[in-house]
Every structure is written in structure tokens, then in C-alpha cells.
Image: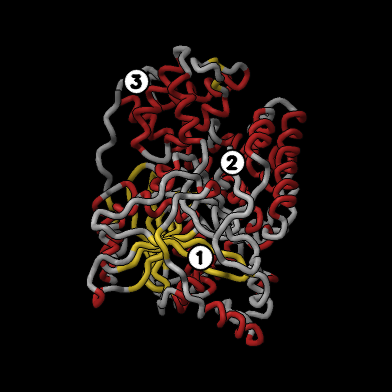
Amino acid sequence: MPTARLISTAALLSTATLLSCSLAACAPTERDAGRGADGTAAASDRPDENRLRQQTLDWRDCPAPSPLQGGGEAPAPLPDGTRWQCATMRAPLDWEKPGGKTIGIALIRARSSGDADDRLGSLLFNFGGPGGSGVAALPAFATDYEELRTRYDLVSFDPRGVGDSRGVRCLDPEAAEEAEEKVDQAPDDGGDESDALVELNELIAAACEKNSGDVLPYVGTTEAARDLDLMRQILGDEKLHYFGISYGTQLGGVYAHLFPERVGRAVLDGVVDPTQDMMEGALGQAAGFQLAFEHFARWCVEQRCTLGEDVEAIVETAVDLEAELDDTPLATSDGGELDGDEVISAITGSLYSQSFWPALLVGLEAVTGGDGDVLAELAEVLGQHGSGGDGDDGTEDDGDDDGTDDDPVDRSNENDAFRAITCDDSSDRYTVADVERRMPEFLEASPLFGPGLAWSALSCAGWPVPGEARHPEVSAPGAAPILLIGNTGDPATPYEGAARMAEALGEDVGFELTYRGEGHGAFDSGNPCVRDAVHTYLLEGRLPKRGAVCEPAPLPEGK
């Protein structure tokens, strides 16, 4: 199970992936030397930055998604006939050297459907990850944001290191699959398994350095935030209007810290706790997923399921099932196997949206009867990675900006980008001893999810780039109000994170709305109260009352 990866329910569904959250992030450190208080370049560098700000984007109809974005068909026009447009923005590879090499940042937009006099500007989206392609995710779920398009151009992008924005490449898919099949993601029988996990992470890190070493130092969240500000300027907006979901809330918080006076109307949904380092974030997630599974178990009891007579019994059933299949995998009808890691993957992915609960119930009941097919299918659908979009692959400027990819590969780079961004952001480099020392806390937080999340802290072992900080700096005194939505049942970004983000942003900046729901995030649940609050702020500039709470829709029916 990978370390914390943050993504919205919309992005999870559009890519059919399980994405966890990375709660450790970059804060400006030595890379900020020579910059002003707002993060802009020193005066001697400004002519080069001005040249980039004055670039004109060549918007064209979007082609089919590239392999690095996940493949698929070109995005279809919106119901009113609006066609999706794609372009490539040039940005400095190294923001400390704006006159040096550049990379391409892949963008996508749908023009506003409203009157020109009512247009507020562009609304930029980041759907999470880190590692998710915004060029792919925005068209997949644009209908959810159609009301916002009455006053905004909807815009998203592949952050640097992702998809067609110089997508990071590590192990080839076959080698990665072969290596991962030999490793238990939650070692439980001594040094050999934990050593193998460390060796796997070091193998991946070496492959990342070999295949993408020139870009690895420059894919962190601070650099992405500076790209956001360049987008804002090139798109012609005085302020950045922004909708960040999951990891996108971390990016939004870092942007607000670097450029507080340039924050426009912003919404952060599924909010990262910016006060936690990587290990603390994983521990918080363990508790969050445990709580979410207990909510599922309570619903399961109400459905008179056969997994146990109460919540405690159902949790025990799941723990025993994972341990049993970890030792002896269950054969499936397609010739494959269902093991303990896949059980956890299926359960975890199903907790990202309560719409998956009925399928999880069926799968768990079936596997207790010796049939692993449903659970194996859930693990495959919710555990594979992939997105969509096309454009410049972000390769080093070679003298032409034709947007072509000279070395296409047949896969999304979501996993590789996740690792690269997470490890560039976080200065934590944990050892087996660190994990073993903290394991009792993880087991107390969750006997089901704790071990996998604890061991995921080793994911940056051998990483060739030093991380920036233990956790992100998001203080933004003087910024415009930012609407934060916390979901009390969120497994990936636990509810407490919204309050901590509000406090860290500063007085009169972070403004929290509570959603008493299930699944990851709130807006994509379709809850009318949440959507009305978001629309009212982004379209009219009016925040909900302090302490406002949105109640959930009824839970889904069972079998």
C-alpha cells in the first residue's frame, strides 16, 4: 500500500484508481534564497521571467490522451458544443534559473458559457494525487462543474513531473510488476521481508534517477505553486481563482503562502493536515481509514450482512481474512490469486466513496465463502493507475515546441510521479528501525490498515534528491478568505486536517465548512448543501456562516 496519496472521488472514479495521500510537503527553504517575500525572483532574474509571462499559448482542440496520461479517447465536446482546448505553457525547469532550460506544462480548458460581462476569469483545478493528470480529470467530470463555467473558464493542468508535463519515468511496467510481486507491502515475519521492501524502494529510486534524473530535483510542490502563478499571469488574471481537492489543497496552501496577495476565490476540499510530517500523516490516515471501515461495518450490520453481528466482529473478520490470505492466497476463477495486499487494496479503494460499499459487502461475503473473484476485481479496478490527456510531454526544450513525445511509453506515470513529488517534498527518510519503533501506535490506530501505512513510510528510501521540509509551510497572512471543506468520514484526509489548515493559514484566511459524510472529499459526493456553498462563494463571493454544517444524503442500500 503506497504512502498517503490524496485525490478527489472524481479523480478516483475517472481513473478507476486507488490513490492515497502524501501529507508531507515542501516548504520554501534554501531554494528560496534570492527571492522576495512573495516568492518572486530576484531583480536580476526578472527579465527572463517577464519573457515567460509574455508568452502566448497556442490553444488547439485536444487530441486523445497520451500514454503517460493514461490513454483513451479525445475528450468529447460539452453538451452546449464547447470544445476542449489544450496548450503547452513553458516554465523554467529550475525556478532559481528562469533564463535556463524550460519544460512544458500541459494545460486544458473549456471556455466560459456565460456572458463576457459576467466572466470572473479562469478557475484552475488540481484534483489531487500527487501524480494525477488534470488534463485527463477535468473533462471526465466537467459536468459537475458546469455551473461554475457560467462565470469562469475551467482550466486544469498536468503538474510538473506528471503526465505530459515532463512525466517522471522509473521502472518499466513489466519490471515493476515483477519486482512488486516478490515483496510483501506489510512485512510481518522478520528482517527478510522488510529488507526486501527497502531494496524494492531503492531499486525504484535508482530507476527514477536513471530515467528522469535531470527533472527529479524540480517536481516539488513549491515549484508547482510557482507554475500556478505563471499560469495566472499568462491567462490574464489579477488573482488566482482555484479549486484544490485532496493533494490539491496542499498545493493551494503552499501557493497562498508564497503569494498571499494574489489569492482570489479559492476552495480546498478534502483538506491535507499541513502540520504533519510523513509518518504522522500516515498514522492519521490509519485512524481515518479505520473510522471509515467502522462506518461501513455499522452499515453492514444494518443490512444484516453475514460478516459479523456487530462492528467489532466485522473488523476482526477483515483482519483475520487479510492475515489468512497473506499466508495462503485464494485462487480466483481467472487463474490468478487474491492475497492479503489485494484485500487491503479492495477495502481501501471502496472506502473512497460510499457508492462502492455495496460491492465491497458482496465481495467480503463471497470471499469468506471461498470465492475471491469479486474482491479481486475490486482490487484490480480500484488499485490500478491511469488517467488521460495529451500535449507536450514536458521534455527539455530542444528547439521546437511541437508538443511531441520523442520516447512514448505505454503506461500512465501516476505511481512514478506520486513518489517523485512526495519524496522531493518530504525531508523524512525513515528506516526499518523507525517503522518498527512506531508500529505499536499504528496497530492501535488500526489493526487492519496500520501495518501497511507504517511500512509505506519507507517509500523514499534511497531517493536521490533531498526533500525540502518535514511538512509544508502554508501561513498566508493577508490572503483573501479560503473556503475549506472537511468531511467527518473522510478516510484519506481525516476531518481534523481542515481545522489545522485553517489555523495554519491564519486568522480570517481559512474558513471551514463541515460535511457530515462518507468517502474522500465532499463536493464530488453531490451533496446539495456542499455544492451550494461552493457555488455561492466562487460565483458570488459570499462565504457560508461560520460553523456551518452540511448533512449527508442517505447511505446506499445493500444487496
Q: Is residue 554 above or below residue 406?
A: above
Q: Nearer the N terminus, badge 2 or badge 3?
A: 2
Using the image, tell me which numbered label, if any, was put on residue 336: none
Q: Is residue 153 above or below residue 420?
A: below
Residue 179, image x and y in percent?
A: 69, 33
Callout 3: SS: loop
Q: Nearer the N terminus, badge 1 or badge 2?
A: 2
Badge 2 crowding class, 10 Å Cα cut-off, few under 14, some 14 to 19, many 20 or more, is: many
Callout 1: SS: strand
The residue closer to the viewer here, 39 or 157, is 157
- Quadrant for the N terminus in the image: top right
Using the image, tell me which numbered label, if any, was put on residue 2: 2
Residue 237, image x and y in percent?
A: 40, 77
Q: Which residue is mark 3?
A: 305
Q: Within the image, what quadrant is residue 101 found in? A: bottom right
Residue type at tag 3: Cys
Residue 462 seen in render: yes
Q: Which residue is mark 1?
A: 88
Residue type at tag 1: Thr
Residue 221, image x and y in percent?
A: 57, 62
The residue closer to the viewer here, 274 or 362, is 362
Badge 1 crowding class, 10 Å Cα cut-off, few under 14, some 14 to 19, many 20 or more, is: many
The CA distance from mark 1 to mark 2 is: 31 Å
